Image (cartoon, rainbow, N blue to C red):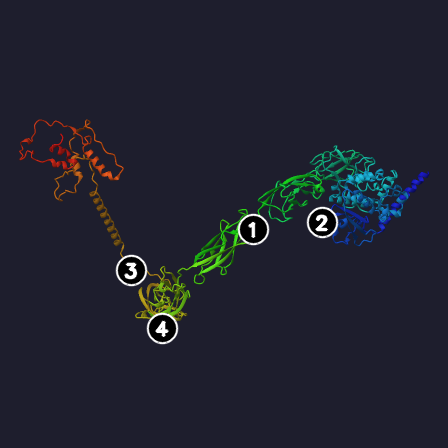
Amino acid sequence: MGRLRSLELGVILLLAQALWSGFCEEGAPCQPSFHSEVFVFSVPRSSLHRGRRLGKVDFDDCGGQRKVLFKLKDSRFKVDSEGIVHVTRHVELHGGEKSFEIRILGSKGERNFTTVKVHLAKHGHAHQHHHQDQDHHKPQDHHKPQDQHKPQDQHKPQDQHKPQDQHKPQDHHKPQDHHKPQDQHKPQDQHKDQDQHKPQDQHKPQDQHKPQDHHQAQDHHKPQDQHKPQDHHKDQDHHQAQDHHKPQDHHKHQDHHKHQDHHQPLQSEHSEVDGIEQPESDSDVPVLVFPQSSKGLKRRKRDWVIPPINFPENDRGPFPKVMVQIRSSRDKEVSVQYRITGPGADEPPIKLFIIDKGTGKLSVTQPLDREGIDKYKLFAHATDESGDGGRAEDPMEIIINVIDQNDNNPEFTKDPFLGSVAESSPLNFEFMKVTAVDKDEPGSLNADIRYKLLSQDPEKPNPNMFFINSISGAIQMNSDGLDREKIPKYTLVIEAADMEGRGLSNTATAIITVTDSNDNAPEFVQSSYTASVPENKADALVVKMAVTDADEPHTPAWSTKYSIIEGNDGGFFNVSTGPSQLEGIITTVKGLDFEKNAHYTLLVTVENDAPFATRLPTSTATVIVNVEDENEAPVFNPVEKVVTVPENLKVGADLIAYTATDPDTAKNQKVWYKAGNDPAGWLSVNKETGLIQVRSPMDRESLFVRGDRYQALILAIDNDDIPATGTGTLVIQLEDVNDNAPIIEERTIKICNKESQPVTLSVTDKDGPGFGAPFRAELQGESANNWTVRMNGTKTGIILTPKSSLEQNDYNVVLRVYDNRGEGQDNTVHATVCDCKGNDVQCTNRVVAGVGLPGILGILGAILLLLLLVLLLLMFLRRRNKPMKEEPLLPEDVRDNLYHYDEEGGGEEDQDYDLSQLHRGLDNRPQVDRVAVMPNFMPAPTYRQRPANPEDIGNFIDDNLNAADTDPTAPPYDSLLVFDYEGGGSEAGSLSSLNSSSSGGDQDYDCLGEWGPRFKKLADMYGGGED
């Protein structure tokens, strides 16, 4: 009964406490306040850059009912609405620590301000900061340094879990007492993410009382994990989740701890609320509990975050390896099965993470690679298998961060690196840079690269000629003594190592080429030059000056440039670099004047395109330029001269004397003048004096005058052996004179004889405006009987009107037109009067001069007949001149003509004959068979070859001609003729009866041999030749 009454009394006290807490919570107004009086943030470096996130200060915003604003005394930091502390501008941690205060504006709570301490984390001494951070969050021990490191004071279970203290109402409603347990361990949770999931290291009593185990746990953490910014903020999200504690949950934990060991740390009371529950067994696997919504008056925070799981990459297993256990608070009430979804579970890479559906243990099946995927986001699901199979909890997001390991060597961006340095470079001169990259996490020690110079080849003149900046990789000069002529190239071996030079490494080569420096000044080959230049000649070559330079050819230290430092005051000369880069060329910019200056003395200097590496003397050369006198043309002064005269100036009148002077004063030459271009031929020029006179009448209205100005070109010529000619322009401004009478533009008009409309005639005057309009007109002669005239309103036109209806005919109207000065002349207008009416001028039924159609046809017939006669005449002449066909005759036959004597008249045809008559007789000749026999029993003569010497061509022709004459094989040959039998007897008498006065024996036939080859046979027959 006693026990039952004690239990009833305990229940009554619990109910009273819950009602009192709810009453106080509803009655007292909520004030925003910080969860801790001090927040400590660790940073890996003493230099804080703008935009860096330091961490998060946890605060209570009264369930989101009030907007929280913060005020900082240090403007270099700011806090956003979520409590994240940012750096606004660059900050240096002098002494390794910086503190500042943050206040909540408008809050009257007990913790409306807090202190933020930023300190530099020291590698290898993390356990010291661990103790220091724990003491910062113990308000009662904050001013007791002698108690900071007493293990027996820190872990007194009787002090932390006294029942009478847990159930004091006044203690439950004090924010500082309510949050005292989690504040005690908050710093180590903020800065050591890896420790969040190892509760056995933080909360096991046996480990807390073993100092050596405590330090061993601290040393186990990797330096790169301690300073990761993302882990730092994830811890703050974890602490933010602690704001959801309700009083009833606190009492649940008190009951739960009644059955636990009194030596267990107090933090385990709140581990379930934080989302990580320490399992009852001694396993190293942390437990994630599904979050539950509060049923009290305070609503659940909207930004609930489950702390992420940090797992190192390249873990060696064994696999599958348990990472965390997921647990539902209802697992003791119903049968819960667990599963996960998301990338790495049921999405690629599939089955990288697996979960035991019964126990909820989440495992990884193979090593992770941060360089491939650095974060996995999974969703854990809990289903009620004992009931209808519905879900037992809302899905919980699980974030797995892959912790970087130093598994990548630095890699150089290129190999080899090529650079160059001048041999005269000063110490500390930076001339090239090498770079390397690391695939590990940027900003971590694993990717913090340092450079080192391993070797130099050759090691001359000393082995430390170069220096490399370990951070930037810049290579600088470390010593003097570079000499391109001795050592033109160096090879350096460079090492890049991560972990600030203590980790993985790689090497590359840098090849440095020593370039030439301008340590040799160019020098002129000659120190003085003398040249002659004709005067008045621009761009004339004066002299070429050669130089030498001992530096490397075709470099800026070898190429040259020149300057004229004395003697070129007038800017007459220019010096430039020649194509070979080792010569200076002086030319004239403008023409020189011998009469003004016959000699020039120039001082020229030479330098390189690159500045001298050291102080060197500058080479100079003196150039003496002699100006050669040239015959210069006389010069008119002025070049263009204007004279104004009236246009009616008399012939022979003097216009002006236009003279020129000869620049060659030393030669004392004479100048004579002539007109070079006188388009109208109006001028004459005196040869000796240059006086210009009027040669013919001038006319302002001439086509050669433009704008009342007449131009003529005047020449001045000296009397040198090669005369030079100067030109001047004479402009004659002609003044107008009334020498032109008005004229009528329209010379023919047409007008109707019925209801005639007036015709306006335009009047113009070649003279200027002073001698023109107004005009007036008068009819002359008989024109006045038929026509009337009057002037228009402007007095520039004549209105002509017939007096009466005139007959259709042509009329000549004579009008005399006067200008305003009375100068006039007669103008004849041919007027055609048509039989029409008004303005419709049409002339019909007029007799047109010319011939009619019969006449035109007769002319065409005569033309055709004439063409026919010409054609017949051409055909007749063509027939008479038809070429005659030549019959092939033997060379020895006599060319005689056969005459047709039955033609009478026409004279003798001894020269011109018709071969057709001959052909008519030849065509009727009887057929005679003829067989030509070539003699083959006589030798043929020998013919000479054509001589090569042209002088022997005459003998060649004579010899071959004689051989041809005596050739027995040449035609004609002896022939056998076959005659037909003509019968017996003949009517013709015998010729033997004819008597001759001479027997022929006394005749001299030797002359036949002189008649040529045609008479050779006859000469042989009668001259006693061969038979």
Spatial separation of the CA atoms under disc 4 and disc 2: 105 Å
Depth check, mark 2 against mark 1: the one in front is: 1
Q: Nearer the viewer, residue 824 or 689?
A: 689
Dot 1 amino acid type? Ala
- Label 1, label 4: how many angstroms apart (C-alpha)? 88 Å
Nearer to the camera, 607 or 72: 607
Q: Whole-Å distance between the Cαs marked 3 and 2?
A: 117 Å
Residue 49 circle label: 2
How would you rate the neighbour count of disc 3 (Cα within 10 Å): few for under 14, some for 14-19, many for 20 or more? few
| Relative image position of residue 525 (x, y in whole percent) | 50, 51
Question: Distance between the Cα atoms at labels 4 and 3?
Answer: 43 Å
Q: Which mark is residue 610?
A: 1
Question: Quadrant location of residue 394?
Answer: top right
Q: Secondary structure at mark 3?
A: loop
In front: label 1 or label 4: 1
Q: Which residue is identified by label 3?
A: 847
Q: Earlier in the sequence, mark 4 or mark 2?
A: 2
Tag 3–tag 2 contact (CB < 8 Å): no
